[in-house]
Amino acid sequence: ALARVIASEAGSGTPAEQRTIAWTIRNRFRGKSIYATQHPWRAQKGSNPPFSSARDASDAHRRLAAEVLAADQSEDPTGGATSFFEPRMQDAFAAAGALARAGETGSRTINGVKMSDITRFKNYKKDAAGIRANWSPGSAQYATAGRFEFWGSASALARRGNPAPREIAVGGD
């Protein structure tokens, strides 16, 4: 199940982006099973559930999932993040949603993102700034890795002295 989320959420990403996604999922489901026989998520529709597992996993995704699940928590590059999003994509989805709600249909390229049918984004109303504003009362940004931002509990971060968001290197690995 974790390998499918890696493939669905960051399949075209760098190894570091995929690893940070995997750790965020592990952190989110701490205490719940995230192994292949139990699926705490399904193919994503809007933001419910919070992660997509719609794509099939490759052997590489399965190996990465196994590594992350077997690793000690001290190896978590995100510092305990439990949520993530890709700001550029969220901005494009929100723009497509606005067009769809205005009655537009068909294919579009928005902010460099090709979309085959904008009507499927009709329910996307929050751009990246809207997501951050919605999350910020109880959440804080923990890290960035490439095109992703990683967020978690603001109170947990405060207990660690509110360190600045980590910059996770994504090239060359």
Image: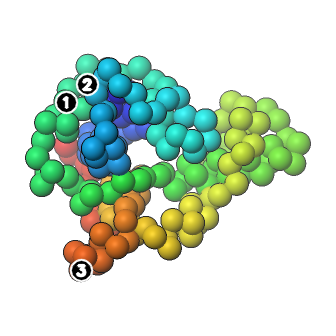
Q: Which mark is residue 62?
A: 2
Q: Position of residue 87 (x, y in %)?
A: 52, 56
Relative to 61, say whether 152 is above or below: below
Contact flag, marks 3 and 1 (Cβ < 8 Å)? no
Q: Identify the mark at residue 161; answer none if there is no mark.
A: 3
Q: Kindly identify which residue carries mark 1.
A: 66
Residue in the foreground of this view, choosing between 62 and 73: 73
Secondary element at image label 1: helix
- In the displayed structure, does residue 53 sit left or right of residue 111? left
Q: Position of residue 133 (x, y in %)?
A: 56, 70
Residue at 82% in and 35% down: 105
Answer whether labels 2 and 1 touch (C-beta < 8 Å).
yes
Distance Cα–Cα, label 2 vs label 3: 35 Å
Which residue is at a point 30% across and 77% down the rendered structure image? Answer: 158
Q: Position of residue 45 (x, y in %)?
A: 61, 35
Any part of residue 11 in sight = no
Pointers 2 and 3 in contact (CB under 8 A)? no
Q: Earlier in the sequence, mark 2 or mark 3?
A: 2
Which sits earlier in the primary sequence, circle 3 or circle 1? 1
The front one of 46 and 28 is 28
Q: Residues within 10 Å of mark 2 (few under 14, many from 20)?
A: some
